[in-house]
Structure formats: structure tokens, C-alpha cells
Amino acid sequence: MRRKIVAGNWKMNLTRSEAKKLFEEVANLKSDLSCDVYQFVPSLFIADLLDAHLSSPVIGAQNAHPKSNGAFTGEISMHQLKDMGVKAILIGHSERRHFFGETNEFLKEKVDAAISEGLTLFFCCGESLEQRENGNHEQVVISQLKASLFHLPEKDFTNVVIAYEPVWAIGTGKTASSGQANEMHSAIRSAVAGNYSIEVAEKTSILYGGSCKPSNAKELFSKEHIDGGLIGGASLKAEEFEGIINAWK
Ligand code: PEP
């Protein structure tokens, strides 16, 4: 059985008090959770949120440097996050690739650092609108996986979650149809099977991200290869996030 997951990515949003309030609201959801819940929060709030000592939602960081320490002004390392008690890290989000110039090679270093710190890594991949319109979308996504993720040995792949996030759907209100998303997830699963084994592929959770909301989550999550969602905008309101979590019921 693959893990079902709903993960929020708060991005650069919320103040300290708003973050605490939202985190508590999500932690106190009365719904019977039928999936694992993660919150990728701004690093600034991690210490506060960890103080609540809750096992769910699991706290993750949105970014970290692969080197464990050193002269990298302004950066936070995965080593430091691990020491704080953080359990998961986002790697390869399109905003990091596009706004901060993170290359496949750098993402590969991050993947290795996350594994060596024992963090669960959520590896994001996805094509631009132009790449989809040119029909290159599967090739683009699989090459992102090959370049930064597939060098891992099979034993480490248990700590990997893949998030397919078409760039044209992130924060735009446009969602991939459940058919388009499932087709890509199926291609990703076949690539994992080809690189590792069918057993590994069957155990790998592949999440969809891109304008996922309560109104479309159930349809998306009903598809064979979609194991949950990575949620941006809709993770900032507890009731919307709850609606997505409840899509698993
Ligand atoms: C994201 O940034 O990971 C994301 C999926 O954003 P949104 O849900 O707002 O499209």
C-alpha cells in the first residue's frame, strides 16, 4: 500500500501569530485523518511550531542548503533543520528552479544531503506550458528525475515522495485534468520501475500539485496513480485544507 499524503506549502506567507493559529487549526481537525498530513512552513516559524510537540501535521522545510555548515550567508542547512527536529524537505519546487536558478546538479546535491540527514524528501518536478504544448512534457519530467533523483540507491528511495507539479498550474487557478495528471503519474511510476523495480514503484507516493482545491481534489485523488496532493494557496486556510484532506474519505 502506498502512503496517501496531503501536504501544504505555505511559501512566503503568514506572520508568526497567523502561522501558529493555522498550524493549531490543522492539528485540531476533527476529521478522521485518512492520510498523512505535512506542512512545509517558512523556516522562521519552525521552532515555534515544533514547540507544540505534535506528531501531525509533520513539519517540513521549504528549502535548505546541501552543505552542513560553512560560509553561506543567509542560508540554513539540512543538518541544522534535522537538529531542530524537522522531518521533511521540499526539493526542486519550480519557484526555486525558476526564481533562484537552482539547477539539476544543485538539486542532486540537495537530494544527497536530505538522505544523509534522514529527512523525507518531497522531490518536485513539472513542465512549463510551452513544453506541454510542444508535447515534451513527459520527457522533461523524466529527465528532471534522472538528473537529480535516480542516482539514489534503491534503499534510500523509501525516503522519497515525488510531487508532479505542472508549472502552468501552480498558483494560476488552472488545474491539470485528472486524466492529464494520472497519465504523467503513470509515466513517472514506470520510470521509477525502470530505474529501480516494480516493487519500489508500487511503494512510491506520487502527489499532484497545481491549483488543487476541495472542489477538484476528490476527482484527482480517485485516479490510480495519484497518491495525494502538494497544496499551495489552499493550504493557507484551514477549512480549505481540510476539504482536501477529506477528499480521501
Ligand atoms: C505549490 O506551489 O506547490 C502549489 C501547488 O501551489 P498552488 O496550489 O497554489 O497552485
Image (tube, rainbow, N blue to C red):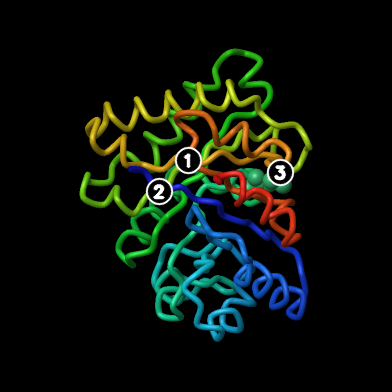
Q: Which residue is mark 1?
A: 227
Is the CB–ligand 1 distance for label 3 below 8 Å? yes
Mark 1 packing: few (<14 Cα in 10 Å), some, or many (20+)? many
Of the pair 47 and 67, the residue shown nearer to us? 47
Nearer the N terminus, badge 3 or badge 1? 3
Callout 3 amino acid: Lys
Q: Which residue is mark 3?
A: 213
Helix, strand or loop at label 2? It is loop
Mark 2 packing: few (<14 Cα in 10 Å), some, or many (20+)? some
Helix, strand or loop at label 1? It is loop
* C-alpha span from label 1 to label 2: 7 Å
Callout 1 amino acid: Asp
Locate residue 207 relative to residue 191 in the image: left or right: right
Q: Is residue 48 above or below residue 33?
A: below
Locate residue 159 relative to residue 216 in the image: left or right: left
**Residue at 61% across, 41% down:** 209
Helix, strand or loop at label 3? It is loop
* C-alpha span from label 3 to label 2: 20 Å
